[in-house]
Amino acid sequence: MSNLYNFINLVRNENMKLYLQRSNQVMMVLLIIFVIAGAIIVTIGSKQHDESENLHWKTDLKEYNEHLEKLAVEHPELKQSYMKEIALNTYRINHNLKPISDDNIWSFVKDMGGGLSLASIFTIIVAASFLTNEFKWGTIKLLLIRPYSRTQILLSKYLVILIYALVLHVLLFISSWFIGGLFFGFEGAGQPYLKYQDGKVIEINMITYVLSQYGIDSIKLLMMATFAFMISSVFRNISLSIGLSITLLLAGNSITMLFNQFSWAKYTLFTNLDLISKYFSGDSFGEGTTLLFSLLIILVHYIFFIGVTWFSFTYRDVEV
């Protein structure tokens, strides 16, 4: 029981150490500024749209469907994507569901989910520097002489990083909801999100959809933060950890497209992260892959990252 209490104190101390750093406080403020800037941009755009708004939206969608049908004939390789959009537009017309405007609180919260990429970058910076700085400043020796095992020290730092990532997620969601409500009103949760799955269109509660998107993006954030933590443990170099992790985060989709032609691509991390996004968007999986398969591949990579991190930190000598 005393060991658990000591470990909780260790996590608490590491958590305080992280939030007392000015740079980490600034990153949280920048995330809120990002949301405010997004609300201002949407407000300006919606005003311009209102001035030229066409009330005959059903006619517009029918004409747009005709255009998509022509594109499907001209570009058969993209036919599936065009037919999906046609089906969604047709469903809106038949069920009198006007397209959701950008100046809707939940539409805004969904769009601000793009800020999770910014949150991922911030988390990577913390994950890459939190452990490495201990070696750089020599404070790792002070931790090692205390009555904690190396495993406990490593686990406490990793948990603090995950808590920080969760805080950024919650901060982005709450600030998007609150700021979006102030700018656009707090109504609109009743409008459904349309999802195309297995050849048919289904309605999903907008709140459920938004939360699921945040959850999906958190998987990528978890993997990239763990990867950055691993690199920092192995090389103990902040620049390398941050640079490599952010490069992979930003170039992940390009990497997926580059190796997609090979059969072994379905075993790579970014391919499966992309497949999960496709699944929840209603797109079909590639041949020989399922949601469970992708989750298992991601789990294997996660275990590998954690294993390398633990082995490197536990069995290497500390040189400061």
Image (cartoon, helix red, strand yellow):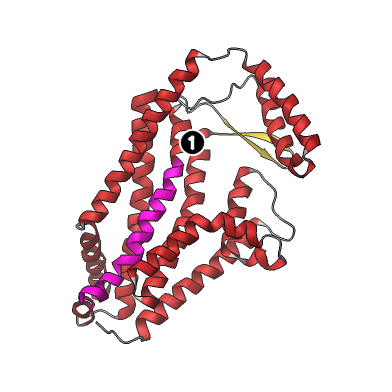
Which element type, helix, strand or loop, lies under badge 1? Answer: helix
Question: Which quadrant: the C terminus?
Answer: bottom left
| Vertical position of residue 158 compared to residue 195: above or below | below
Report x, y in % for residue 134. Answer: 25, 73
Q: Which residue is mark 1?
A: 207
Task: Determine the residue positioned at 54% across, 15% down.
Answer: 53
Q: Quadrant of residue 151?
A: bottom left
Q: Is residue 60 above or below residue 72?
A: above
Residue plotted at (26% across, 66% down): 11
The dominant secondary structure in magenta is helix
Q: Left or right? Give the position of 229 relative to 30.
A: right
Other-residue count near label 1 (Cα within 10 Å), few / some / many at <14 / 14–19 / ≥20 = some
Task: Give the image location of residue 74, x and y in percent.
Answer: 79, 36
- The answer to whether residue 292 is visible is no
Image position of 209 with respect to 166: above or below: above
In the picture, residue 312 is in which quadrant? bottom left
Q: Which image quarter holds the N terminus?
A: bottom left
